[in-house]
Image (tube, helix red, strand yellow):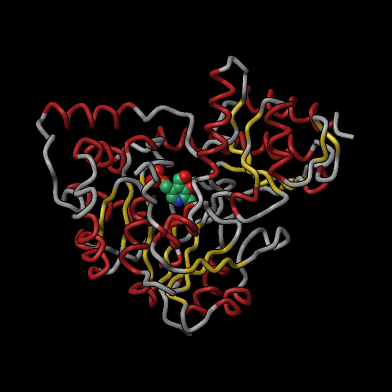
């Protein structure tokens, strides 16, 4: 009678989000009064711009407080189509090809349930965002990790893609710019991948949630722009979280062929129904502009990127390439592995992250969480002062290693 009733078998292969786990540990230390600097977060440190907050306040006062259409209001879907057309010239989507969900993570989850069958293989280049493989597993499919190298800027080569494709391949999930590396694919690199994909039949799911956070004039292109002939096999995942500093509002979406949009709305109609009506109107305000506040945030990230990358490279034993986008630096800490610190040998990147959390009181996510041992993801969604202070503490802690 007192025996525990087991939870579902499908959870046995699924890991909890490692990034959330690190943030949680940092929060615990903070609660104990320890001054921890968090470089582990995946969200902008800015407040949602004022005109977007106003949009939400107006929504509440005008009675937009009821259920909406499952896939989002027509007003929001039209705003998404218009914003997409500006960003991806020559490519148009209809509101019926848009499904708005409770964040892009939810969009990806709807896609996993809507597209993958048991035994399907889903190609995921590593380093990958932590939720991709776990969502694939939850849907009963198999994540197939495609390795990349630091030398190739963590970008999957056409050869590696070709070698990973089998008759069971159902989808490729591409993230550009990437979480965790910040690496973005050029139009040429996307074209080369599209050429390989064109020889086969599988979905190309592109996560462009960081697509508007690119730096040094990087020419960000969507694979649908460089390979429009594959549009009926491409699904774009996007949202307001990162570009507009709106992580808590929970609005993301897909741009997909209409039959995929219908399938995912069927799933959503049986889970969350619609995303929050108020958040949807905030997202309309975001997408309709003005855009100056977003450009200011982007410029702030660009300045921080230089500080963090230069600072990390100045520490003996740490090296780091210059990412094209997002707000992460992906630092190679392989030279620190094997050293003695905090009374023990640092055997993995997880140990290095643990040492730096205890010794430097700086939280960073170990690369292992993203399928890339030997690295640390350092988020620069933090003020310049905090970044400088963090770099100084990390430098001191690393210098103590023997
Ligand atoms: C690569 C990537 N995709 C999707 C998401 C999900 O974003 P949200 O659910 O906040 O829209 C994130 C958030 O961290 C991300 O880093």
Q: In the image, what residue occupies the spot 26% across and 61% down?
A: 264
- Count of marks overlaid on the render: 0
Q: In the image, what residue occupies the spot 41% across and 66% down?
A: 140
Quadrant location of residue 117? bottom left
Q: In the image, what residue occupies the spot 52% across and 52% down?
A: 129
Is the N terminus in the top left, top right, bottom left or bottom right quadrant?
Answer: top left
Residue 190: in sight, yes or no? yes
Is the C terminus in the top left, top right, bottom left or bottom right quadrant?
Answer: top right
User: As drawn, which residue projects farthest toward the front?
Assistant: 1
User: Residue 15 at what x, y percent from top left?
Assistant: 51, 51
Quadrant location of residue 357? top right
Q: Is residue 392 above or below residue 216?
A: above
State the residue in front, 173 or 231.
173
State the residue in front, 89 or 384.
384
State the residue in front, 355 or 76.
355
Q: Is residue 310 left or right of residue 70?
A: right
User: Residue 328 at what x, y percent from top left?
Assistant: 59, 43
Q: Is residue 118 left or right of residue 21?
A: left
User: Residue 96 at what x, y percent from top left?
Assistant: 19, 62
Residue 212: in sight, yes or no? no
Q: In the image, what residue occupies the spot 72% across and 29% down?
A: 391
Q: Is residue 4 above or below residue 266?
A: above
User: As drawn, which residue projects farthest toward the right?
Assistant: 402
State the residue in front, 316 or 51.
316
Q: Is residue 360 left or right of residue 55?
A: right
User: As drawn, which residue projects farthest toward the top?
Assistant: 33
Q: Is residue 207 left or right of residue 72?
A: right
User: Residue 97 at what x, y percent from top left?
Assistant: 24, 63
């Amino acid at each position: 009678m007192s025996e525990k009733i087991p939870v579902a078998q499908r959870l046995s292969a699924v890991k909890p989000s490692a990034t959330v786990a690190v943030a949680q540990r940092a929060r615990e230390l903070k609660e104990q009064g320890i001054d921890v600097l968090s470089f582990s977060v995946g969200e902008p440190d800015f407040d949602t711009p004022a005109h977007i907050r106003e949009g939400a306040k107006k929504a509440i006062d005008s009675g937009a407080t009821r259920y909406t259409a499952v896939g989002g209001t027509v007003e929001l879907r039209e705003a998404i189509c218009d914003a997409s057309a500006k960003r991806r010239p020559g490519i148009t989507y209809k509101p019926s090809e848009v499904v708005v969900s409770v964040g892009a993570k939810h969009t990806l989850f709807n896609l996993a349930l809507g597209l993958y069958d048991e035994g399907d293989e889903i190609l995921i280049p590593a380093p990958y965002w932590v939720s991709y493989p776990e969502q694939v597993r939850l849907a009963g499919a198999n994540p197939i990790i495609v390795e990349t190298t630091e030398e190739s800027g963590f970008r999957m080569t056409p050869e590696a893609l070709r070698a990973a494709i089998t008759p069971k391949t159902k989808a490729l999930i591409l993230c550009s710019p990437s979480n965790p590396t910040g690496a973005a694919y050029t139009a040429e690199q996307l074209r080369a991948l599209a050429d390989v994909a064109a020889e086969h039949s599988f979905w190309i799911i592109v996560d462009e949630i960081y697509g508007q956070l690119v730096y040094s004039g990087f020419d960000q292109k969507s694979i649908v722009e460089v390979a429009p002939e594959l549009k009926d096999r491409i699904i774009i995942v996007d949202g307001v979280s990162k570009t507009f500093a709106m992580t808590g509002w929970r609005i993301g979406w897909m741009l997909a062929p209409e039959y995929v949009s219908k399938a995912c709305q069927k799933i959503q109609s049986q889970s969350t129904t619609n995303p929050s009506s108020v958040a949807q109107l905030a997202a309309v305000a975001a997408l309709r502009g003005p855009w100056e506040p977003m450009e200011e945030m982007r410029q702030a990230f660009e300045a921080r990127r230089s500080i963090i990358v230069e600072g990390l490279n100045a520490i003996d034993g740490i090296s780091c390439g210059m990412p094209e986008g997002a707000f992460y630096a992906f630092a190679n800490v392989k030279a620190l592995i094997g050293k003695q610190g905090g009374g023990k040998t640092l055997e993995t990147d997880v140990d290095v992250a643990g040492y730096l959390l205890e010794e430097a009181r700086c939280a960073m996510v170990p690369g292992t969480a993203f399928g890339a041992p030997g690295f640390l993801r350092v988020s620069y969604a933090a003020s310049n002062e905090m970044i400088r202070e963090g770099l100084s503490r990390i430098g001191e802690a690393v210098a103590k290693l023997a």
